[in-house]
Image: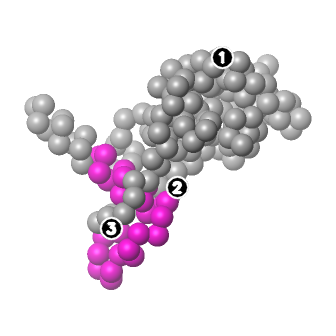
Amino acid sequence: MKRRTGAAILLAASLLAAAGAQAQQPATPATPGQNPLDVVPEKMPFNTPYGAPISLQKAEDAIHAAVAEANKRGWQLNIAVVDSGGNLVTFSRMDGAQLASISIAEHKARASAKFRRPTRFFEEAVQKGIAYIATLDDIVASRGGIPLIEDGKLIGAIGCSGGTGSQDEVICSAGAATINK
């Protein structure tokens, strides 16, 4: 049983890396008849190193910027910031924000931190028919999760939920801009 689980995890990680390579860099193109997932990239995709966890002050600054942008647009959202390990640092639920989106905002932030990429990547993979992506633990295939990078290291991620995926992403981008400069 342990062997099967280990093999499944290894296979899933390999496939995710291959899909990431497809989206990130122009590796040797697939030859006619070759499965694009069989193309082996020369460099690791989404290889931003993990850094020290985001401070509460920086996490709150990101939330405040996101809330300001959402207020400017009249959108009520839930906004979560997690640290480099995917642990919740701070959260804000705007008045009138959808209750179901509380956990989704945190989940988007956590997925973005754990996989070191925006959750838009998973949405695009599903839209391209890369179905295995949905079998990976902690995936959210919806926009609105963005890594927070400081000095070339991932210190956390921000996740927003309550609007459409594109609205969530716009608000997360505003929050992320306080750190991702």
Residue 145 seen: no
Residue at 33% x, 80% y: name it: 31
What residue range appears in magenta? Answer: 12-36
Query: Image check: 35 left or right of 174?
Result: left
Could you say where residue 24 lies in the image, as x and y percent from the top left?
Answer: 49, 60
Q: Amino acid at mark 3?
A: Val
Q: Are the residues flagged by discs 3 and 2 in contact, CB closer than 8 Å?
A: no
In the rendered image, which residue does mark 2 sit on?
124
In the rendered image, which residue does mark 3 sit on?
39
In the rendered image, which residue does mark 1 sit on?
56
Residue at 47% x, 25% y: name it: 85
Is the C terminus in the top left, top right, bottom left or bottom right quadrant? top right
> Looking at the image, what colour scheme do you see?
one colour
Q: CA distance from mark 1 to mark 2?
A: 31 Å
Q: CA distance from mark 3 to mark 1?
A: 41 Å
Position of residue 164 relative to residue 64, above or below, is below
Q: CA distance from mark 3 to mark 2?
A: 19 Å
Query: Image check: 120 left or right of 137?
Result: right
Which element carries disc 3, helix, strand or loop? loop
The answer to which of 125 and 90 lies nearer the viewer is 90
Q: Is residue 16 magenta?
A: yes
